Image: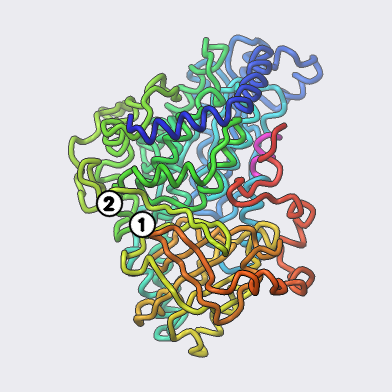
Amino acid sequence: MHPTIEKVTQRIIERSRGTREDYLGRMDALKALSPHRSSLSCGNLAHGIAACPQSDKDTLKFMNKANVAIVSAYNDMLSAHQPYQTFPDVIREAAHGMGSVAQFAGGTPAMCDGVTQGQPGMELSLFSRDTIAMSTAVALSHNMFDATLLLGICDKIVPGLLIGALSFGYLPTILVPAGPMPSGLPNKEKQRIRQLYAEGKIGKDELLEAESQSYHSPGTCTFYGTANSNQLLVEVMGLHLPGAAFVHPGTELRDALTRAATEQVIRLSKPHGGTLGLGDMVDEKAIVNALVALLVTGGSTNHTIHWIAIARAAGIIIDWNDYAELSSVVPSMTRIYPNGEEDVNAFNEAGGTPYLIRELLNGGYLHDDVETVIGHGLEQYARMPELTDGALTWTPAVSESRRPEVLSSAAEPFAPNGGLKVLDGNLGRGIIKVSAVAPEHRTVRAPAVVFHDQNELKAAFEAGDLDRDCVVVVRFQGPRANGMPELHKLTPYLGVLQDRGFQVGLVTDGRMSGASGKVPAAIHVYPEALDGGPLARVRHGDMILLDAEAGSLTVDVDEAEFAAREPAGADLKASHHGYGRELFGWLRRSASTPEEGASFFWNHDA
């Protein structure tokens, strides 16, 4: 193992010793009681099997066959999750083939950040993760199940499913992806058209046509945002079947992988002799593997929040210092939009996750000695699935990348370190994703232009007020303020300013997510402005330095003067009426900081 990877892992193990032992102790106690159907009264069990066909009733009356819980984030508005409509029937058939049963245990909400970007509904996005976690726990609370299949792909959905399922971590669990849509309009062209629209050079009809050519069919969006980062990280943790992440929906191979996942989770169940659950597999080494995978691929900055909360749900404590130290030594091995021009389909064609895993194992960047859903050892994931005469088989990953401009080797990476930096300074603590930012733009020193709402920036841009060097500060966007929405609405305008030759940066206590692009953005900054953090004291014209190379975020104002300033925003606390405040005000009051996982219920020991 690379010495820094080993050092960070051991530090996490030591830091988490007490909370991890407590978590595993609770899971062991629950595991000793399973299968829980045996503890149900006759009335309880009768309710649980009342709607089943007679053959399933006969099976579930005995405790020597598995009952698989299906927890799904299906809805037919969200393109990534629409394919899940047919999955339960495939799963039930596969379970029957194993002499077992699968029941649809529950559904979870699944909002699409692509639909809510720049809209009031975006304020519910981060909150939805904890709602999904609770929904998952409710689905598994009936003491009917021996194993779990989690059906989800996007943004907050996979983290929520995992957090909820880890409360039942004695159950074996496999995540079942649905795959990306085929490639459409190239992402770089889509971004170009968005900027033309922002400049008023094309109309809404042309913009809609371009967007519809990009997002055009069932499946996950093809850029490397939070959804596809979810899939890659989960696979590197050994919670998918090998190579399952990026197989298109509606294909024979996709259905074969879903059947195989069902059969495998049944083999892992206690009635079939299995001894390991989800909580055993999500250990400190698996978490470090996920962080390494995030960093080498320049994945979503959302996971500097979500994986902290996932780890905590398993009794493991990680922080941004762990991300930063790992990022300083792991290589950058992918060029997937927004870190390049190609999409996840090109990445998969190049060799995909199996090739990436093998390269990272050989380079000493991943732990091989982990438990996965197909057995001990991550090396088994250096294989790609295929159909041979109708049968599902796995073959070794390609020996060399088929698209070296998209996926490199570990020996010849695109950069010697990962794409994430932690920023510290008198403006607070935040993060920046630099993998998509050209080196000449990674340091910006310019006057502040301050906004309290992302919609204010559009008006300033159209008025020509931003045609100069500037650091745009968008504050009151943190977890307690309005749910910490993503601020992609800003991206086209800031990109245009940068293309005009201006020095441009963004500083915010909000989020930018996996589509963080070419403009340097200091995000997740805390303490947030609503709590009187330093951003609340910034004024128009203050000179701000955003230095991604040095890892600093500072304002050039006399320390005593800055401290004496009255924080802005007392009026905003009462005047904002977005969905995030009105629906979840009671929950917002207990929101934690981004580095604590910006969690609400699931981030605390229970």
Q: Is residue 118 left or right of residue 344?
A: right
Instruction: Tell me which corner region of the image, top left, top right, bottom left or bottom right, holds residue 59.
Output: top right
- Residue 166 is situated, as x and y percent measured from the top left of the image, at 61, 31
Instruction: Tell me which corner region of the image, top left, top right, bottom left or bottom right, holds residue 5.
Output: top left
- Residue 51 is situated, as x and y percent measured from the top left of the image, at 70, 27
Q: Is residue 78 left or right of residue 222?
A: right
Q: Do the numbered discs 2 and 1 sit on residues whose CB atoms are within 8 Å?
A: yes
Q: Does 260 appear in magenta?
A: no
CA gap, disc 2 to disc 1? 9 Å
Q: Does 133 appear in magenta?
A: yes
Identify the residue position indicated by label 2 in the image.
415
Q: Tell me the residue at 31%/59% (across/down).
A: 340
SS class of the residue under badge 2? loop
Which amino acid, mark 2?
Answer: Ala
Identify the residue position indicated by label 1 in the image.
435
Give the quadrant of the N terminus.
top left
Magenta span = 131-138
Is 112 drawn above or below residue 88 in the view shown?
A: below
Q: How many marks?
A: 2
SS class of the residue under badge 1? loop
Which amino acid, mark 1?
Answer: Ser
CA neighbours of label 1 inside 10 A, class few (<14), some (14 to 19), many (20+): many
